[in-house]
Image (cartoon, rainbow, N blue to C red):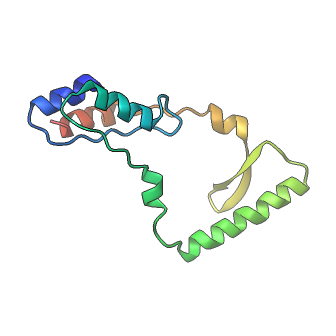
Amino acid sequence: MANTIEDAYRRGKTHAIIVVAEGYRPHTSELSAMIDAMEIGFSARVTILGHIQRGGSPTAFDRMLASRFGVKSVEFLLAGLSNVMVGLNGTEITPIPIDDVISNVKQISEDYIHMTSILSR
């Protein structure tokens, strides 16, 4: 990653964007410090996208969905379900086993990787 950023700097790029998945190690602050210590031409600045995304006002749909999730969560608990999360399946709210959620690793499409190499030139 550092080589890619350094190469972009050498080609005249004035900035770079690095997207880091939630839970990635090292954490973004550590990664930022590592990039700064390498002195590759850029100084790093961390922005937590979730904080920006959460800045808008919730819509009526958002409020209703949150209320439905809350009600279903309590109903699932009262029914004896545990180790599940609530999820929206079509229009139905269903319990999803936590093990299914954390074992579902999504791979990045090769098309996206190719696209980023074109856009970063």
Q: Nearer the viewer, residue 110 or 34?
A: 34
Q: Nearer the viewer, residue 22 or 29?
A: 29
Q: Position of residue 25 (x, y in %)?
A: 49, 28
Looking at the image, which residue is at 28% across and 42% down? Answer: 17
Q: Position of residue 70 (x, y in %)?
A: 74, 63
Q: Position of residue 27 (x, y in %)?
A: 48, 34
Looking at the image, which residue is at 26% across and 37% down? Answer: 116
The quarter of the rendered structure image containing the C terminus is top left
The quarter of the rendered structure image containing the N terminus is top left
Q: Residue 50: in sight, yes or no? A: yes
- Where is 36 relative to 15, above or below? above
- Where is 77 relative to 21, above or below? below
> In the image, is 39 to the left or to the right of 22?
left
* Residue most extreme to the bottom: 60
Quadrant of the rendered image containing residue 103: top right
Mark count: 0
Q: Position of residue 97 (x, y in %)?
A: 74, 41
- Where is 6 relative to 48, above or below? above
> In the image, is 18 to the left or to the right of 42?
right
Q: Residue 109: in sight, yes or no? A: no
- Where is 32 relative to 59, above or below? above
Q: Nearer the viewer, residue 50 or 68?
A: 50
